[in-house]
Image (spheres, rainbow, N blue to C red):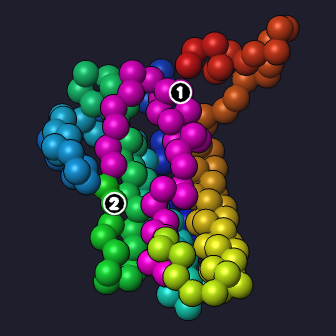
Amino acid sequence: MNALTGSQPETPEASSIAVTMDLHTLRRTGRKALRFSGHQIVEAKGAGFSHDDGASLWYDLSIYRSAAQAVIVELIARRTQLSEQDMFRAESFPTLQDAAAWLENYACAQDVPIPAALAVGAGPMAMSVLQAVQLRQRIARIHDEYQGLLSDVFEALDITDDEPQPGGSSMVDAAV
């Protein structure tokens, strides 16, 4: 189960309510921090997996609206193993739909470290195959957890795909 807070759909009525704009500085691994004035729309924390099942990775997700009306996404890959560092991402988008598209297309597999023995091909072939299968299962569990987190966030923010229009594209696809 994911923890979701601050989930208020962005409606025209909600935007007329006075909102406090705070200064936020979001950490980004390998990049300069992203600083902006704005407010948090939603925060969701992944449930994570126990260290015993081999996953030891989950996501925390926050979405902000900047004073300039940009949508800021903060995505943190949290890791429990001391040898692995958390990965911090923060991206800015012109619309909530653009941010949703980026989140939907995010590849969780890039956050899963490859075991050293598998990376160098050390050991017998059967052991490498077993490790590769275990890695694939780990990635699948992490991906499923991430998809669940996104579903919770999209539902809380009332982000939907519109009914496809004649010609096979949806209004959301056309806006992206």
Residue 51 higher or lower than 36, as above or below = below
Circle 1 is placed at which residue position?
Answer: 97
Quarter that holds the N terminus = bottom right
Q: Nearer the viewer, mark 2 or mark 1?
A: 2
Q: Check the image and report above or below for 134 versus 95.
A: below
Total numbered circles: 2
According to the picture, the residue beneath numbered tag 2 turns out to be 87
Mark 1 crowdedness (10 Å alpha carbons): few <14, some 14-19, many ≥20 = some
Q: Is residue 145 visible?
A: no
Determine the residue located farthest toward the top in the rendered image: 166
Q: Quadrant of residue 49?
A: bottom right
SS at mark 2 in the image: strand
The percent position of residue 93, horizontal first and vertical second, equals 39, 27
Check the picture and name the quadrant holding the C terminus. Answer: top right
Q: Compare residues 50 and 107 and report the one nearer the observer.
A: 107
Q: Return the residue nearer the eye: 71 or 137.
A: 137
Callout 1 amino acid: Gln
Q: Earlier in the sequence, mark 2 or mark 1?
A: 2
* Label 2 CA crowd tier, 10 Å (few <14, some 14–19, many 20+): some
Magenta segment, which residues?
89-117
Q: Is residue 109 magenta?
A: yes
For residue 79, the mark is none
Q: Measuring 68% from the left and 15% from the top, which residue is drawn there?
A: 171
How far is mark 2 from mark 1, CA to CA?
Answer: 24 Å
Element assignment for label 1:
helix
Q: Is residue 27 visible?
A: yes
The amino acid type, in three-letter code, at marker 2 is: Met
Quadrant position of residue 63: top left
Q: Residue at x 59, y 41 (%)?
A: 104
Q: In screen coordinates, is 49 left or right of 86? A: right
